[in-house]
Image (spheres, rainbow, N blue to C red):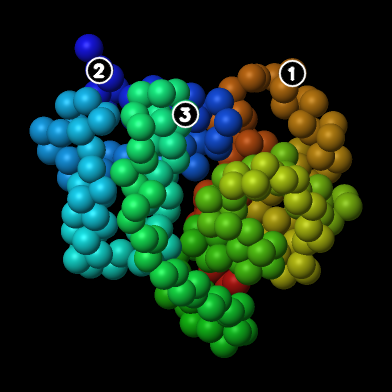
Amino acid sequence: MSETVRSFFNTWLSGKKLSTSPATHALYNRSLTKFLGALSFKADRPLSGVTPSDVAVFRDSRLKEDHVSGGSLGLDLRVIRSVFSSARRQGLILHNPAEAIDLPTNKPLERDVFTPAELSALLAVASPEWRTLILCGYYLGGRLSDMASLSWNSVDLAERVISYTQGKTGRKVVVPIHPRLASICVSSAPMAARNTPRSRCSSAHHQRSSNLSTSASACPIASRASEVRSARCKASAFS
């Protein structure tokens, strides 16, 4: 019996777990899930039954959806191309149906840094926890997911640096702590994090528990800072 589209897609996705980050794997899974939905009953038919017309219909239907950028659709189509290319290399199909479909033009968005006035406007309406998160992103230049997962083991108050590993690239980043962010860290940090160098604190933590979520030294910075400020009524820390 010929392999179905769905079964081959699942096999391909399983293999990608070994070579991609969880976030990238999730993007691949999302793209292929949408395509399988568009194929309807064909998703459970042989791979050879998928035609360029099927891919074109998927592309055109995605273009009609609200808030779908050229970059998102381009990613979907590149993932589909890659899967069918793998099937062709394995001799399961003779032609890649996605190669006949043009990719959409992607006009990258131009991003700029928030101005001090814009930062102040954000902080004025943000909750205490989000204020800390915003300031971490602003002064460290990190992605939201990386900033939200920072722990006290990432903070070295003695050396005035914060280090973390980027979730998307796997690259370790070490950034000096801006004085404004440093004052928040000092006032919010657990006593052990204030008085102990990061390396020793991390070592002691691992001796206490292998579960990061059970240790005060591993509580997310934004959450911990919010708790301390609420307890001490220090809403003026961000003014």
Secondary structure at badge 3 equals helix
Q: Residue at x 44, y 69 (%)?
A: 106
The quarter of the rendered structure image containing the N terminus is: top left
Q: Residue at x 59, y 40 (%)?
A: 219
Q: Residues within 10 Å of mark 1 (few under 14, many from 20)?
A: few
- Residue closest to the far right: 159
Q: Where does the image place residue 21, in percent across and percent down from the top left?
A: 55, 37
Secondary structure at badge 1 equals helix
- Residue closest to the far left: 41
Which sits in the foreground, 133 or 174?
174
Q: Residues within 10 Å of mark 3 (few under 14, many from 20)?
A: few
Q: Residue at x 34, y 47 (%)?
A: 98
Q: Is residue 32 above or below residue 239?
A: above
> Which residue position holds label 1?
207
Which sits in the foreground, 188 or 173?
173
> Which residue position holds label 3?
89
Q: Amino acid at mark 1?
A: Gln
- Residue closest to the far bottom: 117
Q: Is residue 190 visible in this depiction of the protein?
A: no
Q: Amino acid at mark 3?
A: Arg
Q: Residues within 10 Å of mark 2 (few under 14, many from 20)?
A: few
Which sits in the foreground, 97 or 172?
97
Q: Where does the image place residue 196, in percent across and percent down from the top left?
A: 84, 39
- Residue 2's tag is 2
- Residue 5's tag is none
